[in-house]
Image (cartoon, grey):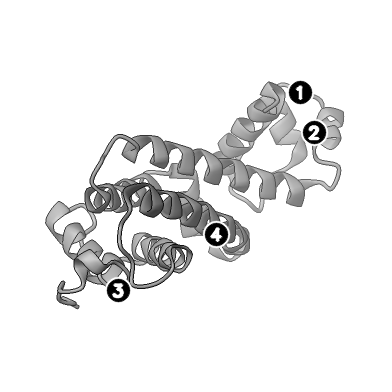
Amino acid sequence: MDEKKIKIFQATLDVLYEKGLAKLTFEDVAKKAKVSRQTLYKYFPYGKDQLLAEVVSFEAFNWLKDLAEHIDLIEDFESKTVEAVMYAHRSLKEHKVLNKILSSEPEKIMPLLAQEGIRVVTFVELYVVNQLLARGLLTRVKAELAAEYIARMLISIVTSPGSWDLSDPAQVRTVVRGEILSPVLMEYKDTKNVL
């Protein structure tokens, strides 16, 4: 990706943290990124909405890349899934810009997050399909359907954990076995639903 564009994205995140979404302006982003407004319009001809959509996409891509790298060397699929849930939950809790905007202007950011969420689910599905096929895990359903279920459950649990403590490895392993893997993987068919 173009280094100048990355610089603009980082400047946008800085301005969002400092001023919030409602007060974000091209002038502030240009000043923070040390580029002209014309440069911003060259990259984002549709204005602030395009810039925000691309920043959310950029952050989501980086988050997924970091997540994949974090769990890549874990061999066991269950352990990989447990660590993915814990890492994803922790990294979202620690994302200072996201949390500031969610607490102060949720109505403005939620539509962007919902739109990006579709891409995140698709990416996770592809990753899970590859993991299932590479390991020859036996599924009760087609690998693609199993992957879709696993992806949607992972995202649901990470973003809305309910009473689960996602910083506790034992609790995460319980929810992974009982709610995520047992409905679709034969190896977990006798796992009791603990909810």
As measured in the structure, the alpha-carbon distance from the residue carrying label 1 to the one carrying label 2 is: 7 Å
Q: Give SS at disc 1.
A: loop
Mark 3 sits on what residue?
183
Q: Position of residue 122 (x, y in %)?
A: 54, 57
The span from disc 3 to disc 2 (Cα, nearest Å) is 48 Å
Say if 54 sits above or below 140 in the image. Answer: above
Q: Residue type at mark 4?
A: Gly
For marks 3 and 4 on the same chain, the one whose residue lies earlier in the sequence: 4
Circle nearer the viewer, 1 or 3:
3
Element at label 3: loop
Q: Which residue is mark 4?
A: 117
State yes or no: discs 3 and 2 in contact (Cβ < 8 Å). no
- Residue appearing at x 35%, y 37% in the figure: 72
Q: Does the residue at mark 1 contact the one at mark 2 (Cβ under 8 Å)?
A: yes
| Label 2 close to label 4 by CB (< 8 Å) | no
On screen, residue 59 versus residue 160, left or right, reads: right
Q: According to the image, label 2 marks what residue?
A: 40
Q: Nearer the viewer, mark 2 or mark 4?
A: 4
